[in-house]
Amino acid sequence: MAQIEYKRRSGYLFLAVMVGHILLISAQVNARSGVPVLEQYAFGALSEIQRAVSSTVSGINRAWTGYVVLRGAREENDDLKRRLAAAEIQVQEQRAEAERAKGLAQLLELRKSVALTTAAAQIIGGAVIPGFRTVTIDKGAHDGLKADLAVLAPAGIVGRIVTASPRSAKVQLLVDRNAAAGALVERTRVQGVVIGDGENGLQMEYVSEVADIVVGDTVVSAGIDGIYPKGFVIGRVESVEKSGTSVRRIVVHPAVDFSALEDVLVVLTPAPGSEPPGGAGG
Amino acid sequence: MKAAGVILAIAVALALQTTLAWYATRGAVTVDLVLVAVVYVALTSGPTAGLLAGTLGGLAQDTLISGGITGIGGLAQTLVGFLTGVVGTQFIVVQAIPRFVVFFLATVVQQAVFMGLYELLDLRHFGTPYAAVAEQALGNAVVGVVAFQLVELLPGAMERRRAMRRGPRR
């Protein structure tokens, strides 16, 4: 047992001495690079340790940083989503404002072009009863509005006021089933009465059976109903039904897009030379 | 006590080696007395004493004689001392021929390690030194065996001389 211990101790001593010799030799011998071998190997070993430590530390650092960044990115993502949503709403608002400004500009142009006293009004509501097409505007009796005043849009005739409260008024659209307006075909001056169908269309009635009317003819107000001033566009002939040579039914497509109305002009003065309503104006 | 003997043996070997160094420069058979001392110590005292003797002798040779890289000779001598000590504990090396072989091989190993390290480190080139190594191995072996015989015979011879001086007993 003691002999084994002795041999083992001798072996350790031998290893230690050999290592000592190797270190001693390495400290004196220069490698090809001019650096002592001991320094070269010591540096190499140290650099490997440094590399291992550095990669470990940087790995942990990257993982930690990535975790923190991911957390930050998530919050940032949520914030960006909120801001994007707000920006989209803002864009839509600005687009609406632009459209509204465009509409107002057109309305202003119309106001300049007509020799009538008008009041601009904004649509603030609409009826939801099928067949009855009315809207509410934000001007009323305090602004000089009253029943049977014509309401116009840049594209053409909108309708007439049927009820005026102090601060608002109800407008019967021309497409209402009870609405009607004196009209004439611009090309041939054929007269008739335009009546709403309760949806989005118009029909021209009380037209001579031999009248010269073709699809595409422009229909304007005749100014004979005491409500609508003469010459304003009502719509365009969409179809003409005939029986032989007799005109049976004329469908007119309104010039105004009633579903997109926002701003209108109310004609405050009666149409000059207008006659008392006779079958027109409901 | 053993350490002191080791140091003394190495010191004597170094002294003789340095005084006899010129023989080598004149082309005579080179004998490495330090190596002989190391092998002797290793065979008589074991691997630990052998490696200590090798370390001491090798480093001393490196610093005082060779003028080369300190440690190469030390490493070679340490290795030889340790291995010889191991051989001495594993085998019975008491006859002249086994001792001769051990000295011879120890020299070959020492030279192989010494020259190999120099070659490996690209510090010195030895060409084909087989003859020189063989000569040195032969010389070391002869000197070693003789040294062993002298040391072993010396106590008996001294005793016999004393007995002869006293004369025959009656």
Image (cartoon, grey):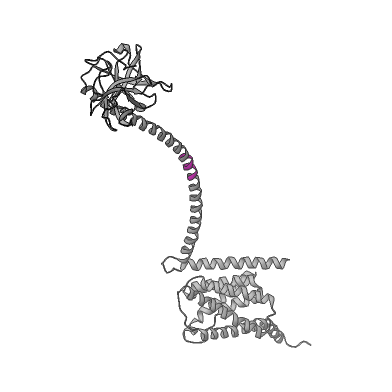
| Residue sitting nearer the eye, A113 or A244 | A244
Q: Residue at x 43, y 23 (%)?
A: A130
- Image quadrant assignment for residue A102: top left
Q: Position of residue B142 (x, y in %)?
A: 60, 85
Q: Residue at x 47, y 39 (%)?
A: A74
Q: Is residue B165 left or right of residue B25?
A: right
Rendered view: A278 above or below B39 = above
Image: magenta residue range = A66-72
Q: Residue at x 63, y 71 (%)?
A: B49
Q: Is residue A12 left or right of residue A240?
A: right
Rendered view: A145 above or below B63 = above
| Residue sitting nearer the eye, A58 or A154 | A154
Q: Main secondary structure of the magenta part?
A: helix
Q: Position of residue A158 (x, y in %)?
A: 31, 22
| Residue sitting nearer the eye, A240 or B66 | A240
Q: Is residue A101 left or right of residue B38?
A: left
Evaluate whether residue A253 shows in this view.
no
Magenta highlight on residue B34: no
- Image quadrant assignment for residue A18: bottom right
Q: Position of residue B11 (x, y in %)?
A: 56, 74
| Residue sitting nearer the eye, B92 or B29 | B92
Magenta highlight on residue A69: yes
